[in-house]
């Protein structure tokens, strides 16, 4: 379940197979183990005798699927009713992350770049740096992003960094810390991005989250 996929990957049990993991770690799994066909939007994946699932609650979906296969749909429905969950949950993980919502090119330089941005939002992802890593010109990279992603490289990087900053604030990080670790840089840059995309300041966002916990 969840990041347990990394244990299977390290053991070589996922080489040449399809697999999934929590959306927040899917890009890292794909980047670190290129022999795996990672499906970032899947709730769970069965590839031969190996099964992987997304977040912890997706383990329930996977378990119900195993019960259904071994014991039939009737018992699986009964278990689902007892747990008060869907037998087959609608939708995938795409509602949860920028990386998962973005189409993943299979054979061009963008695939590796998208994985790198998602895996380490705080790294140097300037247009020049990404073009150099991809081995293409700045102009060609910009055109690829427009054609395959539907936005500029800067806009994509900002959206991933904004999501990372939200996660950091959710976990109790300070505004300054979230700005630095997400790659946004300064408090002011983070503030402008929050207001532009979410309509609230980072401080207000953090306060609302903490209030909901209390």
Image (cartoon, helix red, strand yellow):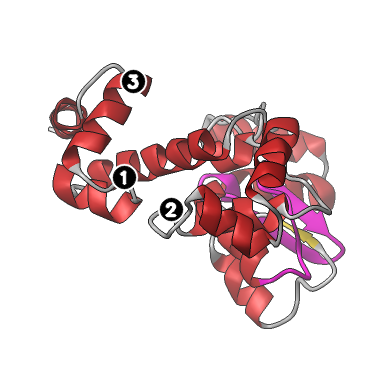
Viewer-nearest residue: 2 or 70: 2
Q: Residue at x 66, y 74 (%)?
A: 8
Q: Residues within 10 Å of mark 3 (few under 14, many from 20)?
A: few
Residue sitting at 78 percent across and 70 percent down? 35
Choose between 194 and 154: the one closer to the eye.
154
Quadrant in the picture for the C terminus: top left
Within the magenta stretch, is there residue 18? no
Of label 1 and label 2, which has the lower sequence position?
2
* Percent position of residue 193, x then y: 32, 29
Q: Are marks 1 and 2 in contact (CB under 8 Å)?
A: no
Which residue extends farthest top? Answer: 199
Q: Residue furthest bottom?
A: 11
Residue in view at x 59 percent, y 70 percent: 6
Q: Name the residue that disc number 1 marks.
A: 184
Above or below, comparing residue 56 to residue 8 in the picture: above
Residue with the mark numbered 2: 121
Write the start and end of the magenta stretch as one range.
33-59
Distance from the alpha carbon under mark 1 to that under mark 3: 14 Å
Q: Is residue 44 magenta?
A: yes
Which numbered disc covers residue 196? 3
Considering the numbered disc 3 on the image, is that residue within a helix, a strand or a loop? helix
Q: Residue at x 62, y 34 (%)?
A: 101
Between residue 91 and residue 150, name the one nearer to us: 150
- Asked if 191 appears above or below 116 in the picture, the reply is above
Measured from the top left, where is residue 29 in percent x and y? 61, 64
Where does the N terminus fall, quadrant-wise? Answer: bottom right
Q: Specify whether residue 118 is in view.
A: yes
């Amino acid at each position: 379940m969840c990041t347990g996929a990394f244990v299977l990957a390290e053991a070589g049990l996922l080489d040449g197979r399809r697999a999934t993991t929590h959306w927040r770690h899917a890009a890292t799994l794909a980047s670190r183990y290129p022999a795996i066909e990672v499906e970032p939007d899947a709730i769970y994946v069965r590839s031969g005798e190996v099964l992987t699932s997304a977040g912890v609650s997706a383990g329930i979906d996977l378990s119900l699927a195993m019960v259904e296969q071994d014991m039939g749909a009737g018992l699986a429905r009964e278990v689902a009713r007892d747990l008060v969950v869907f037998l087959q949950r609608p939708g995938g993980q795409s509602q949860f992350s920028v990386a998962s919502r973005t189409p993943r090119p299979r054979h061009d330089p963008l695939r590796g770049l998208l994985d790198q941005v998602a895996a380490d939002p705080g790294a140097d992802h300037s247009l020049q740096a990404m073009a150099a890593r991809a081995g293409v010109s700045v102009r060609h990279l910009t055109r690829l992003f427009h054609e395959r992603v539907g936005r500029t490289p800067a806009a994509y990087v900002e959206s991933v960094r904004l999501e990372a900053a939200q996660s950091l604030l959710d976990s109790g990080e300070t505004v300054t810390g979230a700005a630095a670790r997400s790659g946004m840089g300064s408090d002011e840059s983070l503030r402008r991005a929050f207001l532009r995309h979410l309509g609230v300041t980072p401080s207000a966002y953090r306060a609302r989250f903490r209030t909901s916990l209390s």
